[in-house]
Each structure stands twice: as structure tokens, then as C-alpha cells.
Image (cartoon, grey):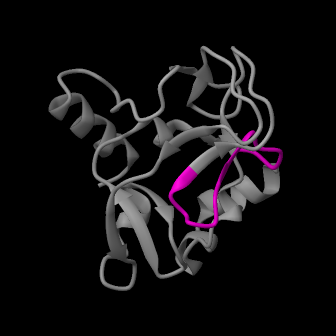
Amino acid sequence: MNFRDIDLFADRMLGGAPYIETIAGLELRASPIQGRGMFAKRAWTTGELLCILDGQVVDVARHPGVIDALEWNALSPQLLLVRALRTSYGFINHSGRPNTRIDEDRRTMRACRPIAPGDELTMDYFEQPVPPAYLASPEAAALKKNS
């Protein structure tokens, strides 16, 4: 499975919708950063809650394929919070100057600076305790280079 597979699976399981809305007030559209991104239709203030992340806790050592195949955020270098279907979160692109951040609990996403209508939501992927296998990937290398 790869990111194209997760998109096809979402299309099939969600009746043509590209994702499950987990952050209200966003729209999916072409991103100048990469591919598609989530853009604000409303404003958020610094510290304001965007969402609480959910998913299945998965041990990367037992299931390394989830890193490349599914949507996830890191709870630790060994444990991921994995989602089989795309959510709003999965379309947030990387930035070295993000406007969202995940709290220390690794599940609460907040605005880390003001977000205005029309802004693309971004996060610094490397602020998470990502698995070493992800850090060694060509995708991670490209993101670091462009940060």
C-alpha cells in the first residue's frame, strides 16, 4: 500500500469523499508546498484547539509498513497513532515555520500562531518523536532539505 492506495481506499469507503473531516472549518485544495493541503476557511488564535487526534496505537517494530502506507502521528519513536482512512490531519503539509503544533500529550493539535482565512495549515513533522525508519526515508530527507 502507498499514499495512492490510501486515497483510493478513502474514495471507496467514504463514497467519493477524499477524507473524514476531523478539523472543522477547512477546505482541501492544491498546495504550493506539495500536492494537496488544508486551507483555513475561518481564523484560529494562538493556542486554540483544532482537534484531538485519534487512531489505533501501532508498534512500528511489529508493523513497519504503516510508515509508508497509512496516515499517522508519532506518540514515540516506537509507537504510532495510525488511521486507515484519510482525515483532515493527513493533508497538513510540513513547514519549518508551522502554524499548528501537537501538544506534549501527542494527541491535541493547536494553532501555534494566528491562522487567518486562506492560510494553509502546516506543521513541523520533525517536532514529533518520529521513528528512525521515517527519518532515514527519502521523503524525510527531502522535507529536511526544503525546511
Toward the bottom, the furthest residue is 61
Using the image, determine if residue 37 lies above or below residue 70: above
Q: Measured from the top left, where is residue 23 in percent x and y?
A: 48, 32
Q: Give the residue at x 70% y 33%.
A: 33
Q: Is residue 29 left or right of residue 101?
A: left
Q: Measured from the top left, where is residue 16 in percent x and y?
A: 23, 21
Q: Is residue 77 magenta?
A: no
Q: Give the residue at x 70% y 63%.
A: 126
Q: Which residue is at the front of the view, 45 or 10?
A: 45
Q: Is residue 105 magenta?
A: yes
Q: Measured from the top left, where is residue 36 in percent x and y?
A: 54, 28
Using the image, determine if residue 111 lies above or below residue 28: below
Q: Quadrant of residue 113?
A: top right
Predominant SS along the magenta part: loop
Q: Which residue is at the front of the view, 29 or 83?
A: 83
Q: Give the residue at x 39% y 46%.
A: 3
Number of callouts: 0
The magenta region covers 94-108
Q: Measured from the top left, where is residue 11 in percent x and y?
A: 24, 29
Using the image, determine if residue 117 lies above or below residue 18: above
Q: Quadrant of residue 58?
A: bottom left
Q: Is residue 28 left or right of residue 43?
A: left
Q: Quadrant of the N terminus?
A: bottom left
